[in-house]
């Protein structure tokens, strides 16, 4: 759909997926193929090194710089609901975290893990903690860093959003959704295709270069599982089965996000090529 829109509008495709930004994952994050990228201009794909931090705030700054160019029509495609909501609803302007505090957070995560942050937040910032995935050390570390740096928790800052870069009414917001049963089969087929097209080689490279599952880039679904198989901890068959389950669970969370945060977006229930073609026609009338 994005390629059809880019062709019809002479537009550019901008990534809104938190993991497709990383240079070390092309296959496991299903970044656009080289062939697809030759059909239209693509931005914010694979431009971040695996050890670098990345956030919705950084993404918003990068998108803002791109869409300041009035000569382009942006077609923003993603995956990460928080990015799309922040773009169209606004994001809190959290003060930057000093490098010294971030380094301290890294040391705590490496030596003590997520429970250290969890204990601190339970005592000092329970409101933020209620909104976090308590099993995600990176999210816990971020909440701890903001509290240490500003004296106020993420929940405080999130309650004070800045104006949106692209107000929803100035866009054509679309969600694409499959029936869960069809989606399950598509996820299984897609993961098998990723395995056949080089996912193992991609993970072998990550393991050889020092894979850190606690880095933001380490959250690529399937990476931990395949690397565990390469290390002999589980079989590759077990790794693939677990990765498929994790992908289905992730897709379920995405659908929940669509329902709760994107109620005002137009939904296309796939497969529906007729509706997609109608959407492309409407976009030509609205944006050309």
Image (cartoon, helix red, strand yellow):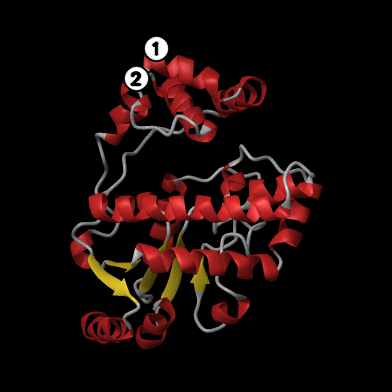
Answer whether residue 288 is visible to the viewer in this image: no
The crowd level at tag 1 (other Cα within 10 Å; few <14, some 14-19, many 20+) is few
| 1 and 2 marks in contact (CB < 8 Å) | yes
Q: Is residue 33 positioned above or below 136 on the image?
A: below
Q: Nearer the viewer, residue 83 or 64?
A: 83
Q: Is residue 36 positioned above or below 144 on the image?
A: below
The picture places residue 263, in percent across and down from the top left corner, at 20, 57
- Picture disc at residue 126: 2
Q: Residue furthest top?
A: 123
Q: Nearer the viewer, residue 237 or 271?
A: 237
The crowd level at tag 2 (other Cα within 10 Å; few <14, some 14-19, many 20+) is some
Q: Nearer the viewer, residue 163 or 24?
A: 24
Q: Residue at x 21, y 80 (%)?
A: 286
- Picture disc at residue 207: none
Q: Residue at x 22, y 60 (%)?
A: 168
> Where, by quadrant of the figure, is residue 254 drawn?
bottom left
> Where, by quadrant of the figure, is residue 190 drawn?
bottom right
Assign a secondary structure to mark 1.
Answer: helix
The picture places residue 79, in percent across and down from the top left corner, at 43, 59
Q: Residue at x 67, y 21 (%)?
A: 111
Q: Is residue 195 left or right of residue 88?
A: right
The picture places residue 165, in percent across and down from the top left corner, at 30, 56
Q: Is residue 234 left or right of residue 138?
A: right
Q: CA distance from mark 1 to mark 2?
A: 7 Å
Assign a secondary structure to mark 2.
Answer: helix
Q: Residue at x 37, y 25 (%)?
A: 129
Q: Name the residue tied to disc 1.
A: 123
Q: Is residue 90 left or right of residue 35?
A: left
Q: Is residue 109 positioned above or below 212 on the image?
A: above
The picture places residue 166, in percent across and down from the top left corner, at 28, 60
Answer whether residue 250 is visible to the viewer in this image: yes
């Amino acid at each position: 759909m994005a390629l059809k829109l880019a062709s019809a509008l002479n537009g550019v495709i901008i990534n809104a997926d938190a993991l497709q930004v990383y240079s070390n994952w092309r296959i496991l994050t299903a970044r656009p193929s080289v062939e697809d990228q030759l059909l239209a201009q693509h931005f914010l794909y694979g431009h971040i090194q695996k050890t670098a931090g990345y956030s919705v705030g950084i993404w918003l700054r990068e998108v803002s710089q791109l869409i300041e160019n009035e000569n382009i029509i942006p077609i923003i495609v993603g995956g990460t609901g928080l990015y799309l909501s922040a773009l169209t609803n606004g994001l809190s302007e959290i003060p930057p975290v000093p490098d010294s505090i971030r380094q301290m957070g890294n040391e705590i995560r490496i030596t003590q893990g997520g429970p250290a942050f969890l204990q601190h937040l339970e005592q000092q910032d329970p409101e933020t903690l209620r909104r976090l995935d308590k099993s995600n050390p990176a999210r816990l570390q971020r909440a701890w860093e903001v509290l240490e740096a500003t004296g106020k928790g993420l929940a405080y800052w999130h309650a004070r959003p800045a104006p949106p870069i692209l107000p929803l009414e100035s866009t054509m917001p679309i969600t694409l959704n499959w029936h869960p049963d069809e989606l399950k089969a598509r996820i299984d087929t897609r993961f098998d295709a990723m395995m056949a097209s080089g996912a193992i080689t991609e993970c072998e490279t990550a393991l050889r270069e020092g894979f850190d599952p606690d880095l933001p880039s380490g959250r690529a679904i399937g990476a931990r599982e395949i690397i565990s198989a390469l290390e002999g901890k589980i079989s590759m068959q077990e790794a693939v089965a677990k990765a498929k389950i994790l992908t289905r669970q992730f897709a379920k969370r995405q659908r929940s996000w669509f329902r709760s945060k994107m109620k005002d977006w137009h939904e296309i229930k796939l497969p529906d090529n007729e509706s997609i073609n109608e959407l492309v026609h409407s976009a030509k009338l609205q944006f050309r």
